[in-house]
Image (cartoon, grey):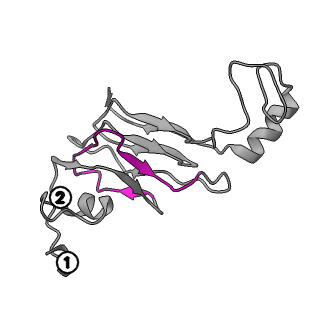
Amino acid sequence: DISNGASTGSSTYPFTTLQTAMDTVSGGSKIFVKGINTITAPLTADLGKSLTIIGGLSTVIGYEEFDPTTTTNIFQLSCETPVHGAVFEFQDLILDNASGWALNVNNATEINVIDCTFRNNGWDGQGLSLTEVASGDTLGINSSQAALTAHNALSASNGGAIRINTGLKVT
């Protein structure tokens, strides 16, 4: 019974959080995720442990809202040196609202990202059009450098979708 703490990771007794699943499963495991998964801190894993995180239709992992005053990642996977054989795979996920990086991976042997969507990572998604001219409160392709710099200070952070430092194979 999950209410008694017996969450085994099975479909009958799923883990209560993605972080618990990542901490508990053995290397090479597949973790299936569904629904909206709101996190409050970066998800971490021992880089010596290969993991596959698989979502489904509209599976979201991320923060409740974008906060440009912080630099938080959704997945923060790192190790001092490259670990031979450590493979991370992310499949069919929507990664949302990281003010840092959605995926920040250091020193893995292989990283695979398959059919993932990255939303509002490193930017709140507001106040800027990449295809239209400036209009009202929205900056556009004709906006000045000063206006874009001011917008960046309010709505963006030093981050983005994926940061990989020493990934030997990336697909």
Question: Residue 153: x and y, percent?
Answer: 77, 45
Question: Is the residue marked by circle 1 packed among few (<14), some (14-19), or many (20+) residues within 10 Å?
Answer: few
Is residue 41 toward the left or the right of residue 155 in the image? left
Depth check, front residue: 71 or 139: 139
In the picture shown, does residue 29 fall above or below 128? below
Instruction: Determine which quarter of the picture holds residue 145.
Output: top right
Number of the label disc, if any, that sits on residue 25: 2
Q: CA distance from mark 2 to mark 1?
A: 16 Å
Q: Residue at x 27, y 65 (%)?
A: 20
In the picture shown, does residue 150 fall above or below 37? above
Determine the main secondary structure of the stretch shown in magenta. Answer: loop
Q: Residue at x 80, y 36 (%)?
A: 149
In the picture shown, does residue 130 fall above or below 16? above
Is residue 32 toward the left or the right of residue 10 in the image? right
Tell me, yes or no, if residue 95 can be seen here.
Answer: yes
Question: Residue 100: x and y, percent?
Answer: 56, 47
Depth check, front residue: 71 or 126: 126
Number of the label disc, if any, that sits on residue 5: 1
Kind of residue sitting beneath label 2: Val
Q: Secondary structure at mark 2?
A: loop
Kind of residue sitting beneath label 1: Gly
Quarter of the picture holding the N terminus: bottom left
Question: Is the residue marked by circle 2 packed among few (<14), some (14-19), or many (20+) residues within 10 Å?
Answer: some
Disc nearest the viewer among 2 and 1: 1
Instruction: Determine which quarter of the picture holds residue 136.
Output: top right
Q: Secondary structure at mark 1?
A: loop
Tell me, yes or no, if residue 79 can be seen here.
Answer: no
Q: Earlier in the sequence, mark 2 or mark 1?
A: 1
Residue 64 inside the magenta-drawn segment: yes
Magenta residues (range): 42-65
In the picture shown, does residue 8 fall above or below 80? below
Residue 112 inside the magenta-drawn segment: no
